[in-house]
Image (cartoon, coloured by chain):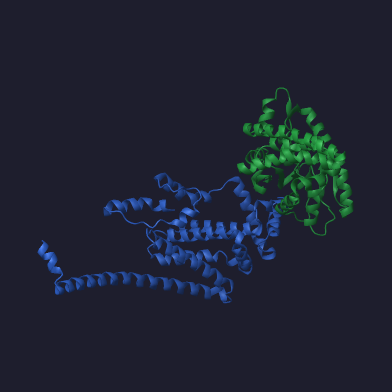
Chain colours: A blue, B green
Amino acid sequence: MLARYLPLLQCYGNIMGRTTIIARPLLASNFSTNRTTSQDANASAQSEGRREEQDSSSKEDDVKFKIFNAALPLVHQLGWTKECLEAGAESIGLSKSSHGIFEHGGTSFVHFFHRNCNKELRKIAKDEQIESAKSDELTKVHQLLEQRLQMILPYLPQWPQAMALMARPHSSLDSYKLLYELADDICFFAGDRSLNATWYTKRAAVAGLYITGELSLVQDKSANCDESWRMLARRIDDLRKVEEFGGSCSRQQEILKDIAQSSLTLIRNLTGMQSYQRNSR
Amino acid sequence: MASLIRRTLLLRTFCRAKRFTCHSQYVHQESAGAERMSNSSKESNETHFGFQTVKESEKADKVYEVFEEVAQSYDKMNDAMSFGIHRLWKDIFVDRLAPSKPCKILDVAGGTGDIAFRIAKYLRNSDGGGITVCDINQAMLDVGRKRASELGFSGMEWLQGNAECLSSIADNTYDSYTIAFGIRNVTHIDKALKEAYRVLKPGGQFMCLEFSQVQNENLRWLYDQYSFQAIPVMGQLIAGQWKAYQYLVESIRQFPNQEEFAGMIERAGFAFVRHENLTFGVVAIHCGHKL
């Protein structure tokens, strides 16, 4: 994941003429399966293509996708279960045993659904060219989050079952991976190119927002889930305020530093300690 | 007097076992695979039968003899050799298969019906309907049929046939094809896999439970010692069959390892091929789908 930002990193180093402490995205190196810790330019091209490779399909993926698409409308009657996959397979003329393609039954079904939604989100972000839009980062994050959350709306009555399946210890590692990928995609397409600790905080915030949104939707009784969308907008506003406050804090910090330095010089002058330096010159 | 005779017999059997330990180390150094053996002796149409080389035409008969001899005490010996763990392996196998009614399942080389009964139990309230057990050996089928009637599975079919040539079964008939601890006894594994592909419906699942290679080297050494020292002895003491169980442990070493076998399954035309190790690789479940 770091290698996506590697060209920027190198530019920054050259321009500023000094080394910068770069917070390496440790989470990224844990999750990326194709990469080692080497940071070649080749590796950067590879990892950029990693998510896009998943988007291209093979014959096997086509069949899996067909079964998935055939099973989705049946989720309302049969839930996120192996039986739903069997019914989907039968409806397209394959044997019931095709459910084995989804190795862990209902859990694999939900996992595939999430991956598919993430893929669609990436496609929407590219098609609508959100990255190059004029609005600020947080607005884009809001927009992408809403679109992603809307993808689960058709299956809302059965969504608690899906959430339970992904929360099991057996599938929790996969869930974290999916959530990380989603947060990373949203931040990337919103235009985040940070190279310090804010890389982590932003993704954690987006992941937290997604989960809050999901939980809110599941128990929302208002018309068109308006309460949840309003809640999401309020959270984005909160984040905006935190960002402004943080920015003003750092300005305050510089002023405070200047004040502290000059008072120290004053005290040294007054107590005569400064004179030592003067005499030594 | 009787104890003296027993002790001499045991001493003789242990001496025999020692010879085969050396042979097994040789086999591992050679990393023998079924294909390689048959490739090298293709001109003379020979294949392996354990560590012996026999004509291909004879192997099926020899395997038949082995299982005819052991049929009666097959289940008892399975329990003794694996300390009952084979039951867990088979339970996990059926759990992975996850069948549901109504479906047609073919259990090949399933002589005494272990897998078939487990599948019937998994499908609750089933009388075994939709399950066909196929075996080359009539003696094994007879044992299985008797057990089925005791357990009340009247709907099961018992079919005698060769896994390499299931001529009595039409194309695209079955939803699932299972073969547990049987495929290594087949002379031409690729033919058996092609037949499996033929009889399955599109989307059908091929599942194979078989002894495979232990990944960890130290554990592999332990496993070899146990296989060559203890199992033939147990076979002699419990079932009165030394050679049959010697053939068993030798045939395990001749069978391709997990990745090679997965490659063979893919070459037969299956997709979504995957495998899972159980008990550190002592057995492996291979799975594939016909698309």
In what quadrant of the picture does the C terminus of chain A appear? Answer: bottom left
Residue reaching furthest to the top: B43
Counting labels gives: 0
**Pick the front one: A38 or A248:** A38
Which of the 4 image quarters holds residue A40? top left
Q: Is B70 situated left or right of A2 in this image? A: right
Kindly tell me whether residue B164 is visible in this rendering: no
- Please state the horizontal and vertical placement of residue A266, each as a whole percent of the image: 17, 73
At x 15%, y 74%, the residue is A271
Q: Is B187 situated left or right of A14 in this image? A: right
**Vertical side of B217 occupied by A230: above or below:** below
Which of the 4 image quarters holds residue A116? bottom right
Q: Is A106 situated left or right of A44 in this image? A: right
At x 86%, y 53%, the residue is B153
At x 73%, y 25%, the residue is B45
- Please state the horizontal and vertical placement of residue A134, each as a whole percent of the image: 37, 63
Which of the 4 image quarters holds residue A172? bottom right
**Vertical side of B247 occupied by A32: above or below:** below
**Pick the front one: A212 or B140:** B140
**Vertical side of B260 occupied by A123: above or below:** below
- Please state the horizontal and vertical placement of residue A86, each as a whole percent of the image: 70, 56
Q: Is A117 situated left or right of B265 in this image? A: left
**Pick the front one: A118 or B9:** B9
Kindly tell me whether residue B220 is visible in this rendering: yes
- Please state the horizontal and vertical placement of residue B273, each as a whole percent of the image: 64, 45
**Vertical side of B257 occupied by A22: above or below:** below
